[in-house]
Image (cartoon, rainbow, N blue to C red):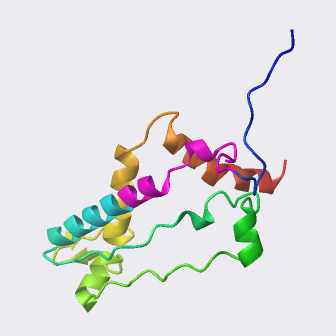
Amino acid sequence: MRLRLPPGPTAPGGSDDTYRLPLAPYSYSDAEYAVIESAQQILARDCMKGFGLSYRPVRKSVSGATSDRRYGISDIAVAVRYGYHLPPQPPDPAPELGAEQREVLYGRKSAFHGKAVPDAGCPGSAVRTLGETVRVPGGRHSGEHRLGGGFPRLDAGP
């Protein structure tokens, strides 16, 4: 009796879309990144309200065009079209802000009308708040941590 192995993923640039790098299942999807970005914007807006300032977040584009490039290009169509360069990305729109809004939003002041401005401003506060509340032990956050922190350690050498 012969052992039959199920077909595995095709090589990069193969005919189907099943090819993924080993840690990719532990990364956030484009849709998940969009949700995280939206949550950060809402928290930053609410932080600005706490200072009596209005802030209307701009919608950023979320693209998977740069995903899974840590080990090089894995999509033959992208490689043929752009070589080693990243595909063009639309510029993120900048919010229209007054001077006081900019100072609080970006944390350029330590206090505003007697209230302490968070380190790195309201977006920094939003990132910290989400970081404290959305971590899933051994889950996607763990994969993101591995993706973000492992390579520099390898690059540093023994």
Compared with 122, 17 (above or below) is above
Instruction: Determine which quarter of the picture holds residue 59.
Output: bottom left
Q: Is residue 32 above or below residue 133?
A: below
The magenta stretch spans which residues? 16-36
Horizontal arrangement in the rendering, residue 46 relative to residue 65 (left or right): left
Spot occupied by residue 48 in the image (x, y as percentages of width and height): 21, 72
| Left or right, 110 with reference to 142 | left
Horizontal and vertical percent for residue 72? 76, 62
Figure quadrant of residue 97: bottom left
Q: Quadrant of residue 39?
A: bottom left
Q: Is residue 65 visible?
A: yes
Give the residue drawn at x 44%, y 80%. Answer: 92
Which residue appears at 72% of the width and 77% of the height?
A: 82
Q: Between residues 8 and 26, which one lies in front from this camera angle? A: 8
Q: Residue most toward the top?
A: 1
Q: Nearer the viewer, residue 13 or 58?
A: 13
For the residue pair 147 and 123, the one nearer the viewer reads as 147
28 to the left or right of 15? left
- Residue found farthest to the bottom: 99
Quadrant placement of the N terminus: top right
97 part of magenta stretch: no
Where residue 123 sits in the image (x, y, percent)?
35, 68
Q: Residue at x 65, y 46 (%)?
A: 18
**Residue 84 shows in the view:** no
